[in-house]
Image (cartoon, helix red, strand yellow):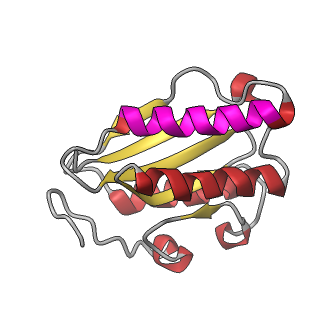
Amino acid sequence: GLQLYFLTICCDQRRPDFEDDHPAAWVASEILQIFPSEQFAVVAYCVMPDHVHLLLEGSTEDADLRAAMQIWKQRTSFEWKRRCGRRLWQSGYYDYVLRDEDSVPAIVKYIIGNPVRAGLVADASQYPHVGSSRYRFEELADGVIDWRPGVRRA
């Protein structure tokens, strides 16, 4: 439905499969392609070397997070196995449905700040594998998120 979901998806055995730019850019492009086609806006994402953070928002009443995650994980897993000959993702994923009192800008800042906290870059704007289907990086970094509970945007 019209909810916001914060997710963490880990690589199998926490292998750093996205350490190199090409696989990280590939999985980012799959995020931006698959989730919007499954009725989810990608408010923010970050592809780390061994995991992915997502903040997704259902864009219709019948948006189905489980189905969208299954499609995304299956498609990326199939292609990864074909390319690399091994499993990509751990079973399951961590999810949290945001409540009215949760701070969306704080969660976005957590997501895009992940590479800085991990010591990968000095400034989040230097990390190439963060983004959104809705906002420019500057808007994410400045907390210019206009989400309010129960309010849909066109």
Q: Between residue 130 and residue 66, name the one nearer to us.
A: 66
Question: Where is residue 141 shown, x and y percent of the image?
Answer: 51, 72
Kindly identify the residue that appears in the image at 60 percent across and 38 percent down: 75
Question: Picture coordinates of residue 96 (x, y %)?
Answer: 36, 36
Q: Quadrant of residue 13?
A: top right
| Residue 68 location, quadrant | top left
Establish if 44 lies above or below 35: below
Q: Residue at x 43, y 70 (%)?
A: 134
Tell me if residue 34 can be seen: yes
Of the 4 image quadrants, the one containing the N terminus is: top left
> x and y percent of residue 83 in the render?
83, 37
User: Residue at the left extreme?
Assistant: 150
**Could you tell me what secondary structure mostly forms the magenta stretch?**
helix
Residue in view at x 69 percent, y 58 percent: 116
Q: Is residue 9 visible?
A: no
Q: Residue drawn at (72%, 49%), measured in percent from left and top?
A: 118
Q: Nearer the viewer, residue 152 or 109?
A: 152
User: Which segment did they paint magenta?
Assistant: 66-82
Q: Is residue 76 magenta?
A: yes
| Front residue of this view, candidates 90 and 97 | 90
Left/right of residue 141 with respect to residue 23 in the rendered view:
left
Can residue 147 be found in the magenta stretch? no
- Say whether residue 86 is left or right of residue 104: right
- Residue 109 in the image: x percent, y percent? 49, 61
Image position of 126 with respect to 108: above or below: below
Quarter of the picture containing the C terminus is: bottom left
Q: Is residue 136 above or below residue 82?
A: below
Residue 2 shown left or right of residue 118 in the figure:
left
